[in-house]
Image: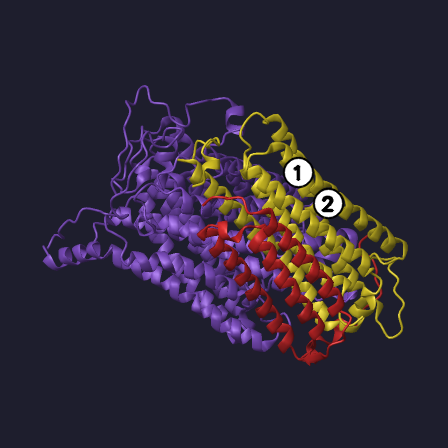
Amino acid sequence: MSTHETDLPVGHQFEDAEQQLDAYSAGMWLFLVTEVLFFGGLFLAYIIYRTRYTEAFVAAHHELDWRLGGLNTLVLITSSLTMALAVRAAVIDRWKQVIGWMACTFVLAGCFMVVKYFEYSAKFEHHLFPGPNFQFHHPGIDSGEAQMFFNLYFAMTGLHGAHVLIGMITMIILAIRLYVMRNQRVDFIPVELAGLYWHFVDLVWIFLFPLFYLVGGN
Amino acid sequence: MSFEPAKPQTYLLTFAALIVLTIITVLAARVVLPKIPMGIMVLDLNIVLAMAIACVKASLVVLYFMHFKDMGQVSKVWASAGVFFLLVMFFLTLGDYENRHPEETKGWTESGVLHDRRP
Amino acid sequence: MSATATHHKESVRVDYLNVAHSIKSWLVTEDHKRIGILYLVTISLMFLVGGIFALLIRLELVTPAGDLVMSDTYNKMFTMHGVIMIFFFLIPSIPAVLGNFCLPLMIGARDVAFPRLNLASWYIFTLGALFGVASLVMGGVDTGWTFYTPYSSSFSHTPVIMAVTGAFIAGFGSIFTGLNFIVTIHKMRAPGLTWFRLPLFVWGHYATSLIMILGTPVVAITLLLVAVERGLRIGIFDPALGGDPVLFQHLFWFYSHPAVYIMILPGMGVVSELIATFSRKRIFGYEFVAFSSLAIAILSFVVWGHHMFVSGQSMYLSMVFSVLTTLVAIPSAVKIFNWAVTMHKGHVKLDSPMLYALAFMGLFTIGGLTGLFLSAMAVDIHLHDTYFVVAHFHYVMVGGAIVAFLGGLHYWWPKMTGRMYPEPWAKLSALVIFIGFNLTFFPQFILGYLGMPRRYHTYPDEWQVLNVLSSAGATILAAGFTLVAVYLIWSLKNGAKAPANPWDATGLEWQTPSPPPPTNFTHRPVVTEEAYNYPIVLAKNGEGEHQEEEKRTHEHA
């Protein structure tokens, strides 16, 4: 057991700090396992429709700007780095650094959402949001098949975006908590757990980016 | 289990590797690879390559950002179980689409006009 | 199993019930025992609502003509019966009530690993249940509990979004419970309590949690997609939008078949406890029973396609699913055989919990074996969507899960409330429930075999006799359940004070007073022996062999 955790408060149900840390870490990983399966259903739908409607998916994905997707990928990867540094600062008990790095992460997450907002509004303007107003004209491509691409695009990136928002809210709460408890040793467990969550959000995007923006053979 | 702070260099190296792999995956999408028909489905080698790169990136994130070495035994087993059952779901469901007779699913590729049929 | 636990004087003892009395103290409690009670109250109310629908369905089916309700109303009745019973009663029943209450006690912990998450799970579940009730108040849903697309997403005129949101939200309650159990079992066991000293109830809950963790998220996303398809027209499943409704069925049953084992696995855990206690013997082949729980949980994820034999699924895949499904019979049979052998030459006492355990063994065997009929693809094509299927799953869910729940509730009632229930009434109602249940559902096997389809409110005249028998049985069954509710509530005030260990059982939960103190144990228990370490008593005819065999079994472990 590292010396850093000896003075952390221990919940009444636990025997010691080590058991508490073990339990929280295992609990968070289990939660991430449920997240994997949560997104898993959508990935399965993607695989099925992608293999059925290959040509329509290739045609439809040209409506997405891979540069914006790529930019967002870089933004999220960078935010993962800043979050990892926030966790590191928490472990070595530097509360100001933790808040600083989390603020960076928060700003980057905000950038991600802003880019996403512009992407989404462009799709709405071009009648590419699925529904009665959906219009997609491309010679030889069934518009219904192309609409499936956008169904999945909005479902998967929308769900991912919701996770980004939840992450941002978590960071605000953690920062306030850290500030309020600034005179104590930094309780790094919540920061560590938020970090795990944030890296998972990054991880999902790592798969979403090629699936939607880089559909085979540009 | 404990969380010994990793060196910032480790994080920076991981970050650099992720950036490089992102660039590689963009470039790889520019090469047109063959598409192999399998039953009623089409296997696109481009997507296989892109997913392979994504898996490498994901592994880097798990190994270094999420401190794989600090993961408890329980977490490791359960994370593997999660991925395993996800693959079970993928393989059995895809086994259906792979083996369906084309006639059986003929109708559902022809999309209709969208009507809201609720009142 | 021996443990060090201190017994306080009865007069001054603080327990988890009398430590605080205000309603607020219940609503903000983080005590797993109180949360178990909160769950018990919620699911009992939901059971009442679902039960009323069951009675209305049986009332309509007394006559061949559809004379009580219109067909649309009938559709809503069986849907609401299914939705409420499955999502808001059966899935949380044993794990969230008995599991929550007993699991930390059984492993000698002060609480579950995440008490606040535990409370959150109750609130989330209750919110989901409120959504379910709201969909009912808004007129009821008519899709069937399975919410099959495209009917649910495009055609139904009923508040489907409300109902699927309810199931979606309640699902997160279930995930949190499962997560809590797994971490608790891994990290919170008392010193000396190794995996193979755990009560089988705990093994059963571990396996259940596996399904909750790995399956529930998939149905969550599936129901979310149905809501989104209906609300925003982002359609993944609607064939008119190029989607495949069979994909919905794949995703739905990937969870919803394992969900059946969420209902039955904890029930099997309860029955293992009951059989051991009332036979006064170690469960025969403990390791096999423990691992068969895990085997059932794992196999449950590879059999879902047997719900889809007539859906347009590839017939080759159907064959694979058909074979895989039969495999589930192996671990299930292992349990039944081992319980039977445990009772062999045991000192069987027929207290009311044991009556439920015996009922479980018989009814679950029938339910399981008819499941084998249905797993055979060719037979299923004849029996699909008939009353045979209805009878089959009610034998598993009512005859299995609810009977086990009642058995467990009686068994731990003294521990939970500190009061004994009136044993003669308990025996009587167990008998009434057993008779009522069989009378309700056995005729349905025959009806199904004769070809009566489920989900219709009219039927040809020649099936009336069997339907009337079934409806009569339902009335008896309802009387049985009412009787249980009445005397259990009566016993809260008027029951005799329960001793710490009324059944003379092993197990840590019986080493602490009834009801337990807020922190479960005054001293942390230390476990030195295996579960079910009952003293060896020579059988009446003095067979030395039996004694030797017992000893051997103990040495092995």
Mark number displayed over residue A171: 1
Kindly identify the residue that appears in the image at 47 percent across and 36 percent down: A5
Q: Return the x and y of residue A124 as percentages of the image width and height.
A: 86, 53
Asked if residue A184 shows in the view, the reply is yes
Disc 1 vs disc 2: Cβ atoms closer than 8 Å?
A: yes
Colour chain C appears in: purple
Query: Circle 2 sits on which residue?
Result: A109
State the CA–CA distance, disc 1 to disc 2: 10 Å
**Residue B7 percent coordinates (x, y):** 57, 47
x and y, in percent, of residue C59 in the image:
56, 50
* Mark 2 residue type: Ala
* Residue drawn at point x = 64 percent, y = 32 percent: A96
The colour of chain A is yellow
Which of the 4 image quarters holds residue A101? top right
Residue A17 vs residue C136, the one in the foreground: A17
Colouring convention used in this rendered image of the protein? by chain
Amino acid carrying mark 1 in the image: Met
Q: Is residue C500 above or below residue C478?
A: above
Question: Sequence order check: which comes first, mark 1 or mark 2?
Answer: 2
Same subunit, labels 1 and 2: the answer reads: yes
